[in-house]
Amino acid sequence: QVQLVESGGGLVQAGGSLRLSCAASGRTFDNYAVGWFRQAPGKEREFVASHAWIGGTTYYRGSAKGRFTISRDNAKNTVYLQMNSLKPEDAAVYYCAARTYNPYASYNAWDYDAWGQGTQVTVSS
């Protein structure tokens, strides 16, 4: 069983940056894909970015391309989401997720079997 703990959320002005971190414990970080999702009040949880174990392939939602970067440090069992040029519409609770039995990335929340508790990102205009 893997446990995920996010950190790094907070309040930032539009145009600013934040780096979210997700630390994994309970199992090694090897051989599984990780992802970031977000959920704003009254909206469905949506995919933000994912990072495969196989080949290190990354995927992003369209609005995140060019602004967000997902990366992982396997030695530290940590995955990051660097968010630049933040917009008010990026405000949400951000969740880290892992496919602990699959090394391939996915856009679908139901493909992930481990989730963190979330970290709030607020962007002021």
Image (tube, grey):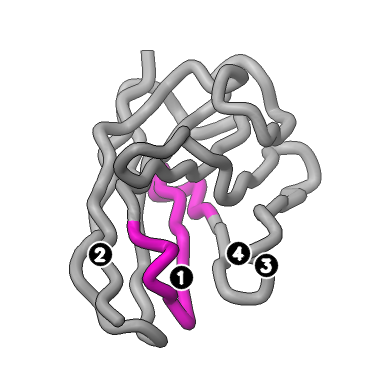
Residue position marked by numbered label 3 in the rendering: 65
Whether label 3 touches label 4, CB < 8 Å: yes
Can you give x and y, in whole percent of width and height, for residue 20 in the image? 35, 59
Looking at the image, is mark 3 or mark 2 nearer the viewer? 2
Residue position marked by numbered label 2 in the rendering: 122
* Residue range highlighted in magenta: 72-91
Report the residue that reaches farthest toward the right: 55
The mark that comes first in sequence, 1 or 2, is 1
Q: Residue at x 35, y 35 (%)?
A: 24
Looking at the image, is mark 1 or mark 2 nearer the viewer? 2
Residue position marked by numbered label 4 in the rendering: 64
| In the displayed structure image, the side of residue 72 where residue 19 appears, left or right | left
Report the residue that reaches farthest toward the bottom: 15
Can you give x and y, in whole percent of width and height, for residue 69 in the image? 57, 66
Q: CA distance from mark 3 to mark 4?
A: 4 Å
- Residue 20 highlighted magenta (yes or no): no
Check the image and report above or below for 71 versus 105: below
User: In the figure, residue 110 lies in which quadrant?
Assistant: top right
Question: What quarter of the picture does the C terminus occupy?
Answer: bottom left
| In the displayed structure image, the side of residue 33 where residue 19 appears, left or right | left
Q: How many numbered circles are shown?
A: 4
Q: CA distance from mark 1 to mark 3?
A: 10 Å
Q: CA distance from mark 3 to mark 2?
A: 19 Å
Q: CA distance from mark 1 to mark 2?
A: 12 Å
Label 4: few (<14), some (14–19) or many (≥20) C-alpha neighbours in 10 Å: some
Q: Residue at x 73, y 31 (%)?
A: 104
Label 3: few (<14), some (14–19) or many (≥20) C-alpha neighbours in 10 Å: few
Residue position marked by numbered label 1 in the rendering: 83
Check the image and report above or below for 58 versus 114: below
